[in-house]
């Protein structure tokens, strides 16, 4: 399936997880700039949503079943959209500049596109998956 999905030995090798990790780190830095009284409100919601993205990608990867992996990726995608909504709250409250919002939203949208691409890859892989029961074994091919 091309270079993008070759040599994947762990969820840490997935481009979608790597990009989401960078977003998570950036969100963690951003919440430090929020008002202290938002520590258990918006800050907490942003941190939880950003951690949910990478955690769901990792958990889905560990399921070893295409459909379950897809479902966890859908959860990750939902958390990415949640991040955009929380960033809009910060923008509406003037806790982030328009430029800062645009930059974080762009990075979040990029992660959404990667999740969508990964889901597409999983769907195609599921459709082309050959079950062991469908493979004909023969001792005639052993040299």
Image (cartoon, grey):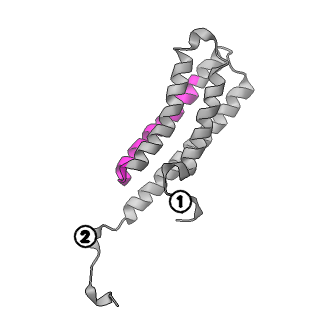
How dense is the environment of label 1, judged by Cα within 10 Å: few (below 14), some, or many (20 and up)?
few
Q: Which residues are magenta?
A: 63-86
Query: Relative to 134, is 12 on the left or the right?
Result: right
Q: Nearer the viewer, residue 138 or 1?
A: 138
Decide whether the magenta segment is chiefly helix, strand or loop.
helix
Circle nearer the N terminus (2, 1): 1
- 127 is higher (above) or lower (below) than 11: below
Residue 79 percent across, percent down from the top left? 49, 33
23, above or below 42, in the image: below
Instruction: Determine the residue positioned at 52% across, 20% down.
Output: 44
The image shows a total of numbered marks equal to 2
Q: Under tag 2, what secondary structure?
A: helix
Q: Is residue 37 visible?
A: yes
Q: Which residue in the rendered view is the most extreme toward the front?
A: 143
- The residue where tag 2 is placed is 133
Mark 2–mark 1 Cα distance, whole angstroms, equals: 25 Å
- CB atoms at circles 2 and 1 under 8 Å apart? no
> Magenta segment: does it hold 90?
no
Residue 12 on image: x %, y %: 53, 48
> Which residue is drawn at the image coordinates 50% and 37% (left, top)?
53
Q: Is residue 73 visible?
A: no
The residue that mark 1 highlights is 5
Q: Is residue 110 above or below residue 89?
A: below
25 sits left or right of 59 in the view:
right
Give the residue displayed 44% in from the left and 40% down from the top: 56
Q: Give the side of residue 68 with respect to residue 88, left or right.
A: left
Q: Is residue 71 located in the magenta-colored stretch of the structure?
A: yes
At horizontal 46% and vertical 44% (from top left) the residue drawn is: 58
Image position, residue 78 (x, y; %): 47, 35
């Amino acid at each position: 399936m091309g270079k993008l999905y070759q040599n994947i030995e762990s969820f840490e090798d997935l481009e979608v997880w790597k990009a989401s990790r960078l977003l998570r780190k950036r969100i963690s830095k951003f919440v430090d700039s929020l008002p202290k009284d938002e520590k258990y409100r918006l800050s907490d919601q942003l941190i939880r949503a950003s951690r949910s993205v990478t955690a769901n990608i990792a958990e889905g990867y560990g399921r070893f079943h295409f459909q379950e992996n897809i479902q966890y990726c859908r959860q990750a995608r939902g958390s990415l959209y949640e991040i955009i909504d929380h960033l809009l709250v910060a923008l509406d409250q003037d806790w982030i500049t328009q430029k800062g919002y645009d930059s974080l939203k762009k990075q979040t949208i990029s992660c959404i596109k990667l999740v969508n691409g990964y889901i597409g890859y999983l769907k195609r892989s599921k459709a082309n998956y050959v079950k062991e029961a469908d493979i004909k074994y023969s001792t005639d091919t052993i040299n």
